[in-house]
Image (spheres, rainbow, N blue to C red):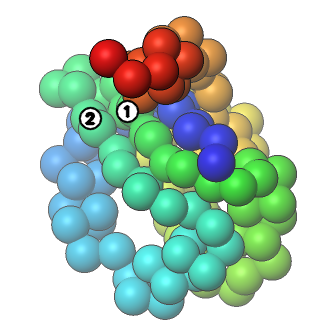
Amino acid sequence: MQRICFQLQVTPGRIDEYKRRHAAVWPDMLQALRDSGWHNYSLFLRPDGLLIGYFETEDLAAAQAAMAATEVNGRWQAEMREFFEDLEGAPDEGFVQLEEVFNLEEQLGRLGPL
């Protein structure tokens, strides 16, 4: 399972509306994410608009392609695009992926029984 962490920048004047929209994501969008292989998906937002997202998937490219093939994702991405600064393309493909440099369970697993 791949752990994906990414960042985007929400326009500061749009933060409240962004949070409101994510408090009640469309049910068909939630279903599409789950069916497309996006698991344990969370978004974290700093007061200045820095958005950090995290999800787990078997295959990032396949999960993105599966979402791109859904009608609901096209509508959602078109509506969400306006919330972000310095974004090329759709938010679900234009994010900056962060490199994972530490994972507790992974390192504990290499140690064996303690």
Q: Tell me the element at label 1.
A: strand
Residue linked to disc 1? 51
Which of the numbered marks, if any, corresponds to residue 109? Answer: none
Residue 44 % position (x, y): 28, 38
Horizontal placement of 54 versus 110: left or right? Answer: left
Q: Amino acid at mark 1?
A: Leu
Question: How many neighbours does mark 2 have within 10 angstroms: few (below 14), some (14-19), or many (20 or more)?
Answer: some
Q: CA distance from mark 1 to mark 2?
A: 5 Å
Residue linked to disc 2? 45
At x 77%, y 53%, the residue is 59
At x 57%, y 62%, the residue is 38
Q: How many marks?
A: 2
Seen from the viewer's position, the closer of residues 107 and 74 is 107
Question: How many neighbours does mark 1 have within 10 angstroms: few (below 14), some (14-19), or many (20 or more)?
Answer: some
Vertical placement of residue 41 versus 7, above or below? below
Q: Quadrant of residue 73?
A: bottom right
Q: Quadrant of residue 103?
A: top left
At x 54%, y 17%, the residue is 110
Q: Amino acid at mark 2?
A: Leu
Q: Quadrant of the C terminus?
A: top left
Horizontal placement of 79 versus 2: left or right? Answer: left
Q: Tell me the element at label 2.
A: strand
Residue 86 % position (x, y): 59, 26
- Please indicate, yes or no, whether residue 105 appears anywhere in the rendered image: yes
At x 21%, y 66%, the residue is 23
- Please indicate, yes or no, whether residue 29 appears anywhere in the rendered image: no
**Pointer 1 and pointer 2: residues touching (CB < 8 Å)?**
yes
Vertical placement of residue 95 versus 98, above or below? below
